[in-house]
Image: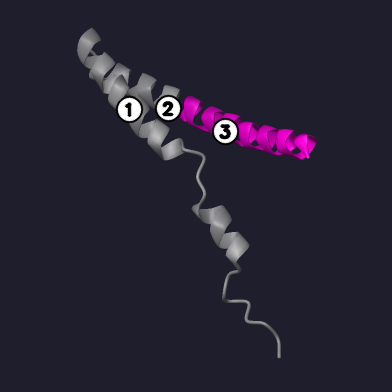
Amino acid sequence: MKPDKSVPDNQAQKEAVSSNGIGSSLSIGLSLGVLIGIIIDDIGLGMMLGVAVGLCIGPAVGVLRKNQKTGEQTSDDEKQ
């Protein structure tokens, strides 16, 4: 009997659920952008800057976290 292809395996589900933090960094950037926009009296410009900063910082933080985890694993392997 062939395995059912309609049921996704656990690995595909884990990859789909994991996030690089883009959503949270986007929301933080947008809220800070609105705050800056209120201060400089141009909310539209502040929102655009906040979204740009959020979209740049989110993936960068995700990569740094991934590198930190792999660095910890290699240092643990070296200790053994």
Residue holding disc 2:
54
Residue holding disc 1:
30
Residue under the image location 59 percent in, 65 percent down: 10
Prevalent SS, magenta region: helix
Q: Quadrant of residue 46?
A: top left
Q: Does label 2 or label 1 sit earlier along the sequence?
A: 1
Pick the quarter of the image with the C terminus. Answer: top right
Circle 2 SS class: helix
Q: Residue furthest bottom?
A: 1
Residue under the image location 69 percent in, 32 percent down: 71
Q: Nearer the viewer, mark 2 or mark 3?
A: 3
Residue under the image location 63 percent in, 37 percent down: 69
Circle 1 SS class: helix
Please state if 73 lies on the left or on the right of 30 as rendered.
Answer: right
Residue under the image location 63 percent in, 77 percent down: 5
Write down the region rendered in magenta.
Answer: 55-80
Colour setup of the view: one colour
